[in-house]
Amino acid sequence: MDDVQKRKQLRKYKMIATGLFVLMALIFVIMTVLEKRNPAHWVGYIRAFSEAAMVGALADWFAVTALFHHPLGLKIPHTNLIQNSKERIGDNLGNFVVSNFLSPQNIRPYIQKIRISNMAGEWLAKEKNQQNLVSELSKIILNILYKLDDDSVTGFITKKAREMTDDLKINHIVGNGIQYLVEKQDHQKLITGLAKQIKEYVLNNQDIVKQRVQKESYFLIPKFVDDTIAEKITGGLSKFFEEVENDLLHPLRSEITSKLYAFSSELQTEKKWEDEFKNIKNDFLTGDKLHQYSVDIWTSIKKSLARELEEEESALKAYLNKNLTELSLNLQTDEKLQYKIDHWVRVTAYKYILKNTHQASSLISSTVGNWEGKELSEKLELEVGKDLQFIRVNGTLVGGLVGLIIYTVSNFFI
């Protein structure tokens, strides 16, 4: 019901209450005149009823009117109560709402009924909702992406990269990396591969060995002797590296492992290696290069992300839809997840409401206090004025009955 309808309804019930008063006044006048001409016993009873009814009607009219206005425009003390007491009404109303509606015992039953996880799961399960959510998220991210200042972003990346690289000790990273590989025995694969490659290289290049032996040999030594020596060398080398390849406990492997451990420790502790890697880092990550790297990185990220967000069936959107489907299923079936989410929402809502109850009270108080007094009176009268007119009607009828009883008692018992 809007304000126009409420005003019509209020006028209607005011007319009923006022009409009843006018009716009692007419009856009183008629009975007064009739009593002078025909002093019948029953006339007195009706006159007493109508007289008391008028008094009751006027008293209740004054009481109801005094709440919202000055009766007849007369500024009688303790009238127009709503307008004169709006600040106090606002404070009392705010305290009333907080005390009776936002108290822990009142809000707890409603908080405990919250089932946000299942509701969210059912909503996400609908394909249309998923598409709308992904579409809106894409628009928001794209809007942010295009509004970002490229120079600011690349400057930020450059600054953070510089901060990270300034404290970066590459010698420690390399040393720890070698140590990690050795501890995991991953270097054994490298030794096996190298041994195999060396063995095959020796076997495939026997002619080179022969040529080298002949070149270093004396001219008096026959060629067949040099060839025999070369064959022995190639055969011994190939057999040695074949043993290294196949035997995981070969002494050479242990020696290489020990050397790697020693080199790893040296990298992490020797000042020369720290300085060497620092010089390499500074040469590689100069200010201009680092800035260019940042520009290239940001340009690539921005271009790729924009393309993925603008295309209707991009890999990114497909990935989001897949994960939203899985999330919706988990929200509907995973009881542990449901409990965690619902419990978090309930606790957060409960704490937030209790923490901010004073703000609700202040909002109500300030809102009512900032209303114009006349406006507040009109608002309240529109809301409760209709019901208050029944007080006038009741006052008229009850006043009449009381007057009738008094008249009857006075005639029969006094």
Image (cartoon, grey):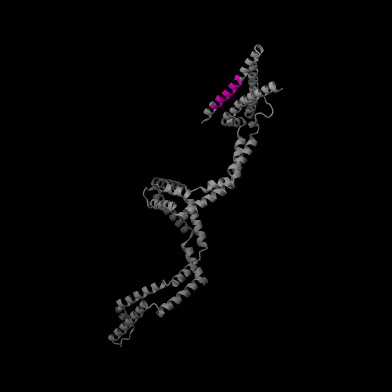
| Foreground residue among 226 and 395 | 395
Q: In this view, does 29 lie above or below 11?
A: above
Q: In this view, does 229 lie above or below 24?
A: below
Q: Residue at x 45, y 77 (%)?
A: 258
Q: Residue at x 45, y 70 (%)?
A: 178
Q: Quadrant of residue 374?
A: top right
Please provide percent x and percent y for residue 309.
40, 49
Q: In this view, does 201 lie to the left or right of 296?
A: left
Please provide percent x and percent y for residue 392.
61, 26
Residue 13 is one of the magenta-drawn residues:
yes
Give the residue furthest to the top. Answer: 37
Q: Is residue 93 left or right of residue 283?
A: right
Please provide percent x and percent y for residue 287.
49, 58
- The quarter in which the C terminus is drawn is top right
Task: Look at the magenta stretch and give its main secondary structure.
Answer: helix
Span shown in magenta: 9-23
Give the residue furthest to the left. Answer: 224
Q: In this view, does 353 lie above or below 159?
A: above
Q: Is residue 132 left or right of residue 47?
A: left
Give the residue furthest to the front. Answer: 412
What count of labels does the image hold?
A: 0
Residue 130 is one of the magenta-drawn residues:
no
